[in-house]
Image (cartoon, rainbow, N blue to C red):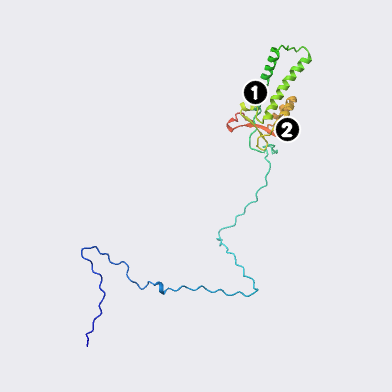
Amino acid sequence: MAPMLAPVEAEAPSKPAGRPFQPSLFQPSSNVIPFEAYSPVEPRAKQPRAEGAPAKPRAPRRTKVPEGQQALEFMAPAPPKPRTLSTTVEAMIYCDAPVAAPLHRAVAAALDWSLVLIAYGMFLLGFHFMGGTIALDNKLNVAMFGGVLLVIACVYGLMWGWLGADSMGMRWTRLRLLTFDGFPPERKQRALRFIGSALGVSCVIGALWTFADEEGLGWQDYISKTFPTPQQADDLVLVRR
């Protein structure tokens, strides 16, 4: 009878002599499930819907609101109202640009008229050197020389209106023209402003209307819907009180 052999146990790998040895970090465990034993879960089958039955609507998801939170009550926006003055009078100017003070405007007008007088003086000098005689002994000569002054003034004023630019007096005093809405005026508005200025100068009350108006506007401002204003906030040296 052959002798029975005892089972040979697996021996742990011996440490090689003369070399560093790192034992295995992962030990076999019973909690590890091999991929071969894993079976996926089958999805739940949908119940068939009867023919002709309407589809059940899906209820919307509602966000749970805390009990301590209250709904906000927003006020309806107020309708736009026209800008009013301190005296509750409706203002004619809709923009925020300030109206130039009467003294500031008077300085600009004086500079413009000085240019007109300089041009008139050059005309008289040219007339004299060409052999003309300046005689104011009769009404005809006075009307003729006065008419020349008016023609030069009209040409000077209409020239800036045709160019669509501010006059030299307004530029030197750092003023600019704006419409009541805050936009640069057009040529038609500049021409109407010149006509209003001529009407205001011819009628004394038109020139003095600026001091009585609550916004400091004159006849030429109302006729053309324009007004002079400083170019920048630093140029507001003269303030109307």
Residue 137: x percent and y percent?
77, 11
Reading the image, the residue beneath label 2 is 223
Q: Residue furthest front?
A: 2
Q: Is residue 37 left or right of residue 214?
A: left
Q: Which mark is residue 79?
A: none
**Do the residues under discs 1 and 2 have CB atoms within 8 angstroms?**
no
On the image, which quarter does residue 108 sit in?
top right
Res 161 quadrant in image: top right
Depth check, front residue: 105 or 3: 3
Q: Secondary structure at mark 1?
A: helix
Give the mark count: 2
Which residue is most to the right?
Answer: 139
Q: Which residue is mark 1?
A: 111
Residue 141 position (above or below residue 153):
above
**Image quadrant assignment for residue 70:** bottom right
Dot 1: few (<14), some (14–19), or many (≥20) neighbours within 10 Å?
some
Of residues 23 and 113, the one drawn nearer to the viewer in this rendering:
23
Three-letter amino acid code at disc 1?
A: Leu
Mark 1 or mark 2, earlier in chain: 1
Looking at the picture, does residue 29 appear above or below residue 82?
below
